Image (cartoon, grey):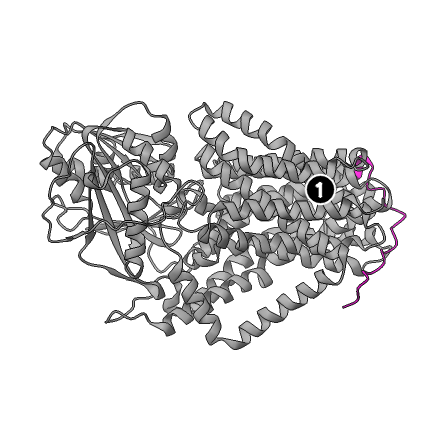
């Protein structure tokens, strides 16, 4: 690898990317790509949910495709206009067929894996099936890569190619700050719009909106790019035909539902997931993103084998009458149904559920809705409800809360702010003196000791004394693939007294285990990650070729970064920028509760402020204090964001949004300045090549973020972002303009 970067390619004299027309084209493309990305990631979560261990890598794969496109832009000389013309014409025609291809490829590879599609039923004995685990991971990797290479990759390849050319032309024409700023601002608007659309549209419908915007982009580009009206009109007619076919006949949606392995009698797309129902004469099964979620026996009024019966028995045995019960995680109504059947109509039940899709699904089954509708149903995130509700209850129940309801939607399995010490403290505060708090949580049997130890430490950190707690586990367990076996922990807390004895053949008493690490808002993992890491490392050790390929890629990347100050600077800048964006996302999930609102506001506002920073960068880059102020702003944001969350969590939504946006401004503006300044400081280097290194750094950050958060908490992420921006700022401060 040469120590010198390739010389910049010649600019295309026919382009004036700083003009209003070109900035309008860039804006429309940025919004269209962002909407398409949001639609795609929602769809992939449904198609590949069974491969959830790869969820942190989904965004990385999108970014890696953008990086590949930017690298190819290096091969284009003064022909940018021709490439942009064809790209703008092709994109509207490609986005919807590629969306379908992504679904088809993912389903085909997963189906080819046979039983590896969902859960491995480990047969007999206590040992895990290593061969099944390897098959699962092999199918996961192939499904993940196949969907990227033969599906959505082409769209984001074109995005990287187009944006790299825009940035190159902008630097050559002295308009880079405006070009990059407009890109960030438009992307931020796209993120906010995409967040709003998830409330109303399915992923496929969002992709239709994106395709329509790409058509508008082609029309707006006609004059600056020299696209003929007949060509733009033909593209528009073709896309309109595909959209009409979907809206009238559901042509694209038919591909979405293939290969599920169960018969769907009813289906709902919520803001968070696809919810399917399979109804039979005697039973009902509810699936979320292809995984079993809840099962009902229609004629079961005794519920003797239902783990939710514990709540009813505790209410019956309570020394003081239980008049009202709060359920966190109402789901499709299973808990309400059990309590209503066993405790009668006099009990007041409040059920809090974040996903209104479950409620819409329950309405479709009168026998289920008859019981569920007797509760006061609140559509809200559980932690936010607990922090803001003023009422107290005789019993508060955590009903197997779905770990994907919080930051898991960003690709972090298990993280949920309900199970932190602050979450338990908020729940405990909603219990009347002498009342009961019941916490139910699924866990891996192989990690039982560590899980119980962590649970006990978290309870104690929340101010709950051990003598107020009894711990139980289910006497049976179920196979959960190569992970091992799955069971459930039941924590019974009596406020101010010792909980009653529980005699149930399905429950086994557990001892309190001290000296664990508590789960906190800065380390929101109640489950361990040891089994996942051990299994993955074991798989890699048994597949030498894969290790060699990964090692070669890592060495190549390290060599490319280490042999050039410009490349290493842009790699660190990209890595740090996404660590910072991940930190912003992390803080927003706790502050707003609603994952879609959180992601839209966090990404949207971060990009909007970054756009402002880019536009201001040319004016401020000559001031030396700026290069100390940027890393200082990252430090300030990292330290104050948790404090601000705690201070504003109970404020109205509008107030929290305003405070969040204002608080984010300094660090967002500072971060937005760095990329255009760096491109100008390294003006003798190729823009596409530097953009490639920046995007590769972004692509590596999500898995690093997840691993760091899983093992150490958010502090390591904070430190990484600070160090990255400090290093890049130091390089830019002492490099001549």
- Quadrant where the N terminus sits is bottom right
Task: Using the image as rendered, state which of residue 440 and residue 104 is in the foreground.
Answer: 440
Residue drawn at x 68%, y 54% as measured from the top left? 571
Task: Using the image as rendered, state which of residue 203 and residue 493 is in the foreground.
Answer: 493
495 horizontally vs 364: left or right? left
- Quadrant where the C terminus sits is top right
Residue 479 at x, y percent in the picture: 28, 63
**Helix, strand, or loop for circle 1?**
helix
Q: Main secondary structure of the magenta part?
A: loop
Does any portion of residue 405 appear in the rendered image? yes
Residue 6 drawn in magenta: yes
Which quarter of the figure has residue 733? top right
In the rendered image, the residue lying farthest to the right is: 13
Q: Which residue is the site of mark 1?
A: 217
Does any portion of residue 240 appear in the rendered image? no
427 horizontally vs 178: left or right? left
Start-end of magenta stretch: 1-22
Residue drawn at x 24%, y 50% as measured from the top left? 489
Residue drawn at x 39%, y 60% as measured from the top left? 530
Residue 287 at x, y percent in the picture: 34, 50
Residue 495 at x, y percent in the picture: 21, 32
Residue 534 at x, y percent in the picture: 41, 65
Disc 1 packing (10 Å; few <14; some 14–19; many ≥20): many
Which quarter of the figure has residue 206? top right
Residue drawn at x 45%, y 36% as measured from the top left? 590
Task: Using the image as rendered, state which of residue 491 and residue 255 is in the foreground.
Answer: 491
């Amino acid at each position: 690898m040469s120590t010198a970067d390739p010389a910049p390619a010649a600019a295309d004299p026919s382009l004036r990317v700083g003009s209003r027309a070109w900035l309008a084209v860039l804006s429309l493309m940025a919004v269209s790509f962002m909407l398409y990305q949001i639609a795609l990631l929602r769809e992939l979560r449904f198609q590949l949910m069974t491969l959830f261990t790869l969820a942190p890598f989904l965004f990385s794969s999108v970014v890696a495709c953008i990086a590949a496109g930017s690298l190819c832009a290096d091969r284009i000389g003064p022909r940018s206009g021709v490439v942009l013309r064809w790209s703008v014409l092709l994109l509207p025609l490609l986005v919807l067929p590629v969306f379908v291809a992504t679904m088809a490829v993912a389903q085909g590879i997963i189906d080819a894996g046979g039983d590896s599609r969902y859960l491995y039923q480990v047969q007999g004995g206590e040992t895990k099936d290593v061969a099944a685990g390897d098959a699962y991971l092999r199918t996961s990797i192939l499904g993940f890569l196949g969907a990227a290479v033969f599906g959505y990759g082409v769209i984001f390849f074109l995005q990287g190619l187009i944006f790299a050319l825009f940035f190159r032309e902008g630097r050559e024409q002295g308009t880079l700050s405006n070009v990059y700023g407009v890109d960030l601002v438009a992307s931020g608007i796209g993120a906010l719009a995409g967040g709003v659309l998830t409330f109303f549209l399915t992923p496929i419908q969002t992709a239709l909106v994106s395709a329509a915007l790409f058509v508008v982009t082609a029309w707006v580009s006609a004059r600056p790019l020299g696209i003929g009206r007949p060509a733009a009109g033909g593209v528009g007619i073709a896309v309109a035909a595909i959209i009409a076919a979907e809206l009238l006949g559901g042509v694209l949606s038919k591909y979405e539902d293939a290969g599920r392995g169960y018969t769907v009698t009813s289906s709902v797309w919520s803001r968070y997931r696809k919810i399917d129902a399979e109804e039979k004469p005697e039973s009902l099964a509810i699936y979320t993103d292809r995984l079993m979620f809840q099962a009902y026996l229609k004629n079961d009024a005794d519920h003797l084998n239902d783990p939710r019966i514990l709540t009813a028995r505790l209410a019956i045995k309570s020394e003081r009458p239980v008049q009202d019960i709060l359920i966190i995680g109402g789901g499709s109504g299973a808990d309400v149904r059990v309590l209503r059947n066993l405790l009668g109509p006099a009990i007041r039940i409040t059920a809090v559920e974040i996903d209104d899709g479950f409620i819409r699904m329950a309405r479709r089954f009168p026998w289920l809705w008859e019981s569920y509708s007797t509760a006061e149903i609140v559509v809200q995130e559980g932690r936010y409800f607990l922090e803001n509700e003023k009422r107290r209850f005789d019993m508060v129940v955590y009903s197997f809360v779905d770990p994907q309801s919080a930051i898991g939607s960003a690709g972090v399995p298990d993280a949920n702010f309900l199970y932190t010490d602050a979450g338990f403290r908020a729940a405990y505060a909603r219990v009347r003196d002498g009342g009961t708090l019941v916490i139910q949580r699924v866990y891996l049997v192989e990690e039982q000791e560590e899980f119980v130890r962590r649970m006990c430490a978290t309870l104690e950190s929340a101010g709950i004394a051990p003598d107020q707690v009894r711990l139980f586990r289910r006497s049976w367990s179920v196979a959960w693939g190569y992970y091992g076996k799955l069971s459930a922990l039941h924590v019974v807390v009596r406020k101010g007294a010792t909980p009653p004895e529980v005699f149930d053949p399905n429950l086994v008493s557990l001892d309190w285990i001290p000296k664990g690490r508590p789960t906190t808002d800065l380390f929101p993992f109640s489950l361990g990650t040891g089994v996942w890491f051990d299994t993955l490392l074991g798989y890699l050790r048994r597949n030498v070729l894969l290790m060699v390929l990964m090692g070669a890629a890592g060495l190549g990347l390290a060599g490319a970064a280490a042999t050039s100050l410009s490349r290493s600077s842009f790699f660190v800048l990209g890595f740090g920028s996404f660590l910072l964006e991940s930190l912003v996302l992390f803080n927003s999930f706790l502050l707003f509760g609603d994952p879609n609102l959180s992601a839209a506001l966090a990404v949207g506002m971060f990009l909007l402020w970054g756009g402002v920073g880019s536009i201001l960068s040319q004016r401020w880059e000559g001031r030396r204090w700026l290069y100390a102020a940027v890393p200082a702003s990252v430090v300030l944001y990292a330290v104050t964001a948790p404090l601000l969350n705690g201070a504003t969590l109970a404020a109205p939504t509008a107030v929290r949004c305003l405070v969040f946006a204002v608080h984010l401004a300094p660090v967002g503006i500072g971060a937005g300045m760095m990329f255009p300044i760096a491109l100008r400081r390294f003006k003798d280097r190729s823009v596409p090549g530097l953009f490639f290194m920046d995007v590769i750094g972004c692509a590596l950050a999500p898995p690093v973020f997840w691993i760091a958060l899983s093992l150490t908490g958010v502090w390591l992420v904070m430190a990484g972002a600070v160090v990255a921006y400090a290093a890049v700022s130091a390089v830019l401060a002492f490099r001549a303009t």
